Image: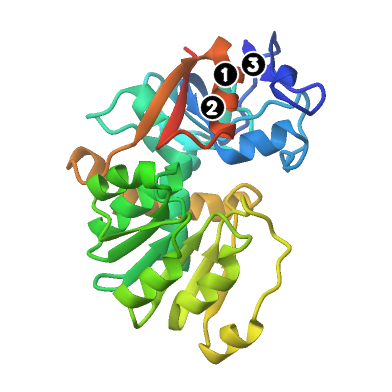
Amino acid sequence: MRAVVLHTHGGTEVLTIENVADPVPGPDEVLVAIAATALNRADLLQRMGMYPDPRRLQPEIPGLEFAGTVIGRGARAAMWQVGDQVMGIEAGGAYAEKICTHERQLLAVPTSLSLPEAAAIPEVFLTAWDALVVQGGLTSGRWALVHAGASGVGSASIQIAKAIGARIAVTCSAGKAALCRSLGADLVLDRSPNDWLAQATAAVPGGFDTILDVVGGEEIDRNLQAVAQRGTIVQVGLMGGGSVQVNVGLLMGKRAHWIGTTLRARPIEEKVAVTRRFAAEMLPLFDDGVLRPVIDCQFAFEEIAKAHDLMATNANAGKIVITIG
């Protein structure tokens, strides 16, 4: 099969497409022919040598999410049939024509969506739902704040919050505000040059019950000021840096929770639990029209370097999809 292989780390020139051996499913795994994958910030970090695949498999193939068709099964795998259209997340390996994954980590592709559209769902919707609802405790009537509202995780977060009856504020650049509003954001805050904290405090004086932060950096102290009494901050990313001065007194005084989380390095049992609960509670909402993937653009497999270059500029609003099969 063809796959993007990393022999070294660096710029987009290290993204090379080569022929490698087909993966072989284990007893509880299925083999999927990938139709499309989608970019995530972690892919750029992995390419640069800053976020390696925790499985340490060789050859090193990036890619965290995929959609495609089941073409093989392990001896004990009985959840899916050959020919089923599925989507899912993995710790790596999705920049390829085929992938093996545990059968319970897969989700059925909604009948209303194409495979390239489905490829834009797994990583960001599972991340947003797990951070906001499962770990963040967001429920109907409460307020959420999500940074980078027009990103993949941000656009998923807006839709999930509205689907469960919560209210949501997002930060984003001015050029992406219209998208956030169109998805249902109750409050859109311009990150720069305006002071979003002052606007947020005036609009939601009681503070935010749940904050999802993919930025870190200078937003960390602002989060502590913006979070409600006994609220929860879920740290999902550190695009703006991770080493900053923090006023721990604010955390203590508000009796707030500050949770650090990633999906990639979790044990298989935890990934399966998140996936199966999402399948039961959220997946039907795609065919109901309540949730939808937000796609900025699509690239062919051979244009993977161009796709990485685009994501590095932060110009995309929504997901960047790569068609493979």
Viewer-nearest residue: 168 or 34: 168
Q: How far apart are marks 1 and 2 (CA)?
A: 6 Å
Q: Do the residues labelled 1 and 2 touch (CB within 8 Å)?
A: yes
Position of 212 with respect to 187 (left or right) is right
* Colour mapping used in the image: rainbow
Residue drawn at x 59%, y 54% is 237
- Quadrant for the N terminus in the image: top right
Q: Distance between the residues labelled 3 and 2?
A: 20 Å
Q: Which of marks 3 and 2 is nearer the N terminus?
A: 3
Work out which residue is located at the far left of the displayed protein and give it: 288
Q: Earlier in the sequence, mark 3 or mark 1?
A: 3
Q: Position of residue 95 (x, y in %)?
A: 59, 23
> What's under tag 1, amino acid-wise?
Lys
Q: Distance between the residues labelled 3 and 1?
A: 16 Å
Q: In this view, does 242 lie above or below 138?
A: above
Q: In this view, does 161 lie above or below 18?
A: below
Q: Dividing the picture into quarters, in which one does residue 229 lie?
A: bottom left
- The residue where tag 3 is placed is 3
Query: Which mark lies nearer to you, 3 or 2?
Result: 2
- The residue where tag 2 is placed is 310
Residue drawn at x 54%, y 27% is 310
Element type at marker 2? helix
> What's under tag 2, amino acid-wise?
Leu
Element type at marker 1? helix
